[in-house]
Amino acid sequence: MASDAAIPAAAPAPTPTRRTAVADPSMSPEAMRRLQAMAIAQRRRRRLQAWLPWMVIIGMFAVWEAGVHAFNVQQFVLPAPSAIAQSMVKWWVPLLDNSWQTLMTTLIGFGLAVIFGLLLGIAIGSSSLLYHGLYPLLIGFNSVPKVAVVPILVIWFGIGTVPAVITAFMISFFPIVVNVATGIATVEPEVRDVLRALGARPSDIIRKVGLPRAMPYFFASLKIAITVAFVGSIIAETVAANKGIGHLMILASSRFDVPLVFAGLIVTAVMGVAMYVAAVAIENRTTGWAMRGQNDQQLSAAGV
């Protein structure tokens, strides 16, 4: 029996995947036609997905422009996209300077939220005592309106960059903690029991099972946190700052320069979309395995 146990078990025969079935010469002509039709439909779908956001954005601005002219809306109420574009060309230097300030404060606050949110999420997800003990505090912390905290931050740190960084951190911290903690806490008890029986320590379970399982949750929270981090920076800049898109928008509104106000909103939206796209690109490179079932579902729909 000892000699038999020393012999490694034969590796199971590889199960043919759906991709190997595509090149299988024994496949029937009807199945091959279905696969070819599915491949063509997938290529069309990818092209549509690539162009659809641009089509929606262009269509929205076209409807916006036509509606302003059709209903003769005054510029100080709702400027047309053409007027906003003219304002962006006219004030591109202040917009660029202030947008860089907003981007810098947002990234600093977001980076701090990622670091502390990931660490606290791991701690909360790994311990049921911390999970139940800190959750009420986190929920209460997240329920406080951040605009009400900015005056306190101004008293503590003065007018400038620091309140905007802290506000961006506060508003983007909670989604990261909750998602990471959820990803680690929802590891199946059976998996934990098997790993403990094999001699794994709690830190090994977290590092080799909990963290990989939490990564899709983590990147989902990043896509939420990076967008709301801009909200935190803009809130702080509108209340107490001497630079930034929020500060520029307040100055423009005091002069009733509504096109410049909308230009600031559009610049902020562009920065948010750019950061969201960056987060999605990193997610696809690191956790693409989490989405591997989508292609299988599409091929299954073709009857393969």
Image (cartoon, grey):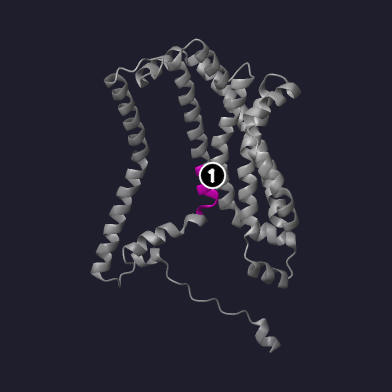
| Residue 235 appears in the rendering | yes
Extreme residue toward the top, this view: 255
Quadrant location, the N terminus:
bottom right
Does residue 65 lie above or below 132 as drawn?
above
Examine the rendered structure and indicate whether residue 116 appears above or below residue 86.
below
**x and y percentages locating residue 236 in the rendered image:** 62, 25
Residue 35's spot in the image, x, y percent? 30, 62
Using the image, determine if residue 198 lies above or below residue 272. below
For the residue pair 161 and 48, the one nearer the viewer reads as: 161
228 vs 44, nearest the viewer = 228
The residue lying at 50 percent from left, 30 percent from top is 271
Q: Where are the magenta residues, as a range? A: 280-288
Q: Quadrant of the C terminus?
A: bottom left
The number of discs equals: 1
Mark 1 — residue? 282
| Foreground pick, 270 / 166 | 166
Q: Is residue 184 left or right of residue 44?
A: right
Residue type, mark 1 in image: Ile
Disc 1 on helix, strand or loop?
helix
Q: At 35% across and 47% down in the image, what residue appears?
A: 46
Q: Is residue 114 magenta?
A: no
Q: Give the percent coordinates (x, y) of residue 228.
A: 56, 35
Disc 1: CA contacts within 10 A as few (<14), some (14-19) or many (>=20): few
- The residue located at (62%, 65%) in the rendering is 188
Q: Quadrant of residue 141?
A: top right
Residue 223 position within the rendered picture, expressed as x and y whole percent measured from the top left: 54, 42
Quadrant housing residue 185:
bottom right
Prevailing secondary structure of the magenta residues: helix
Assess whether residue 283 is covered by the magenta stretch: yes
The reply, left or right, for residue 31 in relation to residue 92 is left
